Amino acid sequence: MAANFFFNLSKTEIYRAVEWSKIPLFGLLKIFRKLFIILFIVFLVIFLYGFIGQRTDYQSQKISLGLTILLFTFYLIVSLIESFFNTKLKKPQPIVSINEALAAPGKFNLAEFLSFEAAQVVDQTIRFCRKRKILPVTATALLYNLVVDKNLNFVFNRILLNIKELKSFFNSYFKSLPKQTITENDYAPDFQETIIEALNLAKEKNRPFLNSGDLLVALAKTDLIFKKILIDYQLKVDDIKNLVRWLENLRERIDKQKRFWEWSNLVKRGSLGREWIAGYTPTLDKFSINITALVKKQNFPEIIGHQEEIKAMERILARTEINNVLIVGEPGSGRKSMVYALAEKSVLGESLPEINYKRVVQLDLTNLLAQLTSLEEIETVLDTIFHEVLTAGNVILVIDEIHNFIGGSLKPGTVDISGILGSYLASPAFPIVAITTFEGLHKNIEQNTSILSLFEKVEVAEVSLEETLELLQNLSLVLEQKNKKFISYQALRDIITYCEKYLPAIPFPEKAMDLLDEAMVYLKQSKDKVLLPQHIAEIFSKKTQIPVGEIEEKERNILLNLEKLIHQRIINQEEAVTEVATAMRRARTKITVRKGPMGCFLFLGPTGVGKTETSKALAEIYFGSEEKMIRLDMSEFQNVNDIPRLLGAPGQEGLLTTPVREQPFSLILLDELEKAHPNILNLFLQVLDEGHLTDGLGRKVDFKNSIIIATSNAGYQIILQALSDPNKWANLKKDLLDYLFQEGIFHPEFVNRFDAVVVFKPLTQENLLAVADLLLKKLKQNLKEKEIDLVITEPLKQKIVELGYNPVFGAREMRRVVQDKIENVLAQAILTGEIKKGCRVEIDPNNFTLKVI
Amino acid sequence: MLAILKKNLFFQYLEWQFFDAPKEIIKGWRNFLLFNLHYFSTPLLIKTFFSYWHRYQWSYGKRFDPKVYFEAFFSNLISRCIGAIIRSFFIILGAITEIIIFFLGLIVLLIWLGLPLIIILGIYYGSKLLF
């Protein structure tokens, strides 16, 4: 490495700036500058006071004028030095590009590529190592000096790093190192690696220099101690990268704002007289929202995401024909922000000439409909508005949720504007941006082909995770200032992780921004000062009922005792319960990263042995309630025509896809799977394999957080036969599957995709007694609330088993027997007053009469 | 040779004082001049000097009717005249500010270039007055 690494800071141009900055007086330049200007003003006033009224003598005037001139000169000198230092010495031009240097790192002095701040830190590091006699210079020493330097405090504060603690840790670490002053190389391999890595990062960003942020990101990759710190703080290299980018963006923005003479800053002040060539729009102004004015008021917020879509929108609007845009996207995907971006680019003259300096105005149809009552009146006003847009010549009209006002079944408070709109749309002087959803497009707009043909569609995908993070970062600065709280980076990161994983039905960025906003309100209530990942986990769990974040004690107990808890409801079926419980533990602890659902099981066995009950029990214990179970009776899907019912279609919600999109963290029970059409079973191949499916509206539905349990009683005869012949018992599963494959009920490739195929055994006499006991105990519990004590006797249980058990229907009938024979009797007795509070009752198993003891 | 000069602090200062910084000042000066034209929309106002005021115009009618024709003609003429008067006012205002910015920029540039001299003179006269 050493031969390939040439690094000598003292031989660089930037080193001179570093040396200058070390002069103590140099650090006081700013103070001197301020002092000189204040003194200059004071002496100028004194001089003028004496001079104008001739209040002082000539000598005093001479002295005060001399001081005034000298102080102003000193002010100029200090300003000049500062300016020369900041704009020239701190920014030397490298002789070669980073690319060339990286191609031959042994040939070029890599220290030439350090920015001033980075050079300062490296210089401090070298001096630190020499002073402490811990040569060669290591990456860890560089990290320590980055922490001490304060230049990256923003990053360390955001990850809630305890700098004080860290410094004392480093101090003891460096003390423990052997003292060494003479080494073969000046720089340790990890330091060399860090510099090369940082250069690569700067190259990626197309910067001629590497800065201290690049050094920090590089250290996250190369330094073992920093890696350990990151693990302790549950952070990754990408997190440091994101934070450094955030800091760099902020600094860049502030620097840009300071350069007031630049065109981009000047042009924000707008222009006079441009509107004089445009017509007046009094009616439009009354029923509209001026987005251009809003953008100016918000001081031109940064445009993040949807860059390609915005460009497409601009291209369409600049056309000479069909210059109307139809933005199609899910609500919350940032469709409106595209219109804001358009307005911003238009004001700043950064768009195409046909769009520049035009007014972007949103028609407030809701307000218009609220103010006008009769249809004729509405039509007249709309016609006036559209005519004004046409004659004004400088308006880009925006109509939000246009599907509400075009064709289809119109809801109250809406009106069909397609007739009036259609006559204007064809005109190139009438550019429109209409916003709709996919559903609105299919359901309403596509029905009106003449209107649709006058629009050009721009489909909006959700913004990327990186862009969402940038949006959250910008929002958090606003929220922090508003609420006087601090938002940790980990909280922002978790918002995105949870939203991505558990709320796939809503697009980014709105869901994440809403959650941050909600979290800040929650934080205000809690009176904590810093928004932590725990807060996000708490609020997210409360909102969605999905347990996220650190596994809490309660959940830990549930997971560890899952078998026991399920067995409180399920008798026997050890294998099934164990399979399900282990899958859940694997999923929650994230032991395996899998493509398919959290777990998928095929339960085989006769009816009434607890297949459905196991699923219900799991839904209740783990997912919180039986309601969290999406239950589909697959016998309802026996034809191919039933697929739209399952996956949804325009205007129709999918029985499978919609609940999963809305509640991805749930248990899906596919009852009587064998009865579904084979093509429908094929749909599940992808779900089991890849963990996702495309619904009838083209949206991706994610099954990665679901558990899929399919039940089937196909081949139950084989199980019954095995009961009578114990020899067959050992090979039961194999025989059963062979039968299913032979009969073509399921294909092997389908069955193999399940995590486990579990055969539910028929219940024995003993099991049945336990089931009867379970049912009666439940009843006893209910009665206890009414202070009535039901005595459960063995003969009663036996009688229920005798009446309720059927080899074909299993234990299912038992519930009905309990209902008919016992619950009815008790209900009647309560109503007639035969049993009262505090009574102890027993049921006679022979004739099911009530005995009050 | 060039490399040695580049590393010499004094030459670096000269380069900055008389080349780098004036370049930046000229850039900013140019931006202000352009922005002034943009702010008063001068080129656009000249281009549309005789356009109708806010596009107010009257139709001459489908059939030739002298009364309607002259009414429309005079109304349109007034609309154009109002437009031209107001525009000329802003064009003049724009031109005046453009001239002011031009001279201000020039003054700033000259002061900058003469700054070393100003400093020397400042120390000289300041000290002379004091002592």
Image (spheres, rainbow, N blue to C red):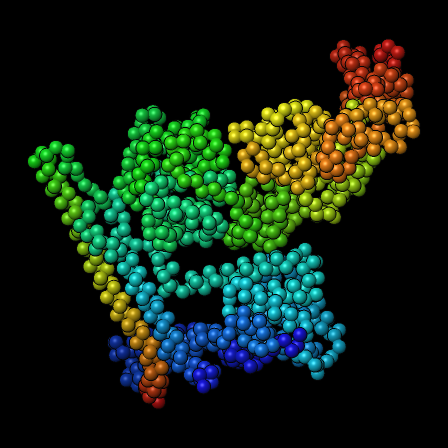
**Residue plotted at (68% across, 47% down):** A549
**Residue plotted at (27% across, 66% down):** B101
Task: Indicate left or right for A431 with A793 as reference.
Answer: left
Q: Nearer the viewer, residue A684 or B54?
A: A684
Q: How many marks?
A: 0
**Residue plotted at (45% across, 42% down):** A458
Can residue A787 be seen by looking at this rendering? no
Can residue A330 be seen by looking at this rendering? yes
**Residue plotted at (26% across, 55% down):** B41
Residue at the limit of the structure toward the left, as seen here: B66
Task: Indicate left or right for A581 with A652 as reference.
Answer: right
Q: Position of residue A152 (x, y in %)?
A: 58, 65
User: Can you tell which quarter of the image residue A610 is in?
Assistant: top right
Q: Position of residue A395 (x, y in %)?
A: 32, 43
Q: Nearer the viewer, residue A426 or A664?
A: A426
Residue at the limit of the structure toward the bottom, as seen here: B131
User: Can you tell which quarter of the image residue A748 is in?
Assistant: top right
Q: Nearer the viewer, residue A218 or A56?
A: A218
Task: Indicate left or right for A96 with A228 as reference.
Answer: left
Q: Position of residue A241 (x, y in %)?
A: 59, 60
Task: Indicate left or right for A596 with A516 as reference.
Answer: right
